[in-house]
Amino acid sequence: MGSSQKKGGKEKPRDPYMAFNFAVEIEGLTVGGFSEVIGLSGKLELESYVEGGVNHHIHRFPKQMDYPNLVLVRGLTERDDLWKWYEDVTRGKIRLQNGTIILKDSQQSKVMAWNFKKAYPVAWEGPQLNATNATEVAFERMELVHRGIYKA
């Protein structure tokens, strides 16, 4: 039915997808539940050229794509595959891995996905430990450098 549903002969627009309903896979394996993914973006760098005698505009030419690092935030769990990957990188064993960020609808069906390619971890941040707040979840952050994002 496309981007809208028919109900009683009238087009009913779908609700927007909720940003909290997603999964992260690396090399096809779901690597845990994440509370946040930051950096799902890209920007085309431009080079400016001022042409002599042309005073009403500046030429702008595409130069290269720039992708910020992806930051994955999740509650700390027993699963340590991301930590092992990070630890390998700190020891000089860099494994470039591909991954996918999958947006799901309310029935947990995939509605959209973005692939990132040739990623490896460049930063890890452990939880902020605080004994005075017994209800806080312990979070970890993993930052990945990568070579591009494209819609799957």
Image (cartoon, helix red, strand yellow):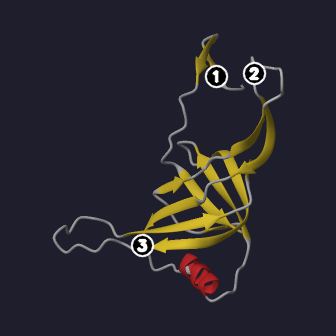
Tell me if mark 2 has few (under 14), some (14-19) or many (20+) residues whose alpha carbon lies within 10 angstroms of its own: few
Q: Which mark is residue 18?
A: none
Q: Could you say which is closer to the camera, residue 52 or residue 56?
A: 52
Residue under numbered circle 1? 5
Question: Label 3, on which residue?
Answer: 76
In this rendering, which labeled residue sits more in front, label 1 or label 3? 3
Distance in Å between CA atoms under marks 2 and 3:
52 Å
> What residue is shown at x 36% (from left), y 72% (from top)?
127
Depth-wise, is mark 1 or mark 2 nearer the camera? 2
Q: Can residue 140 be seen at all in this image of the molecule?
A: yes
Tell me the residue at 57%/84% (across/down): 87
- The residues bearing labels 1 and 2 have C-alpha atoms spaced at a distance of 46 Å
Image quadrant in which you'd find residue 57: top right
Instruction: Give coordinates of residue 123: x percent, y percent.
Output: 53, 72
Identify which amino acid the numbered label 1 is placed on: Gln
Q: Residues at badges 1 and 3 in contact (C-beta under 8 Å)? A: no
Name the quarter where the N terminus is drawn. Answer: top right
Q: Amino acid at mark 2?
A: His
**Which amino acid is tagged 3?**
Leu
Mark 1 falls on what kind of element? strand
- Tell me if mark 3 has few (under 14), some (14-19) or many (20+) residues whose alpha carbon lies within 10 angstroms of its own: some
Task: Using the image as rendered, state which of residue 64 and residue 52 is in the foreground.
Answer: 52
**Left or right, residue 146 beside residue 70:** right
Residue position marked by numbered label 2 in the rendering: 57
Q: Position of residue 126 (x, y in %)?
A: 41, 74
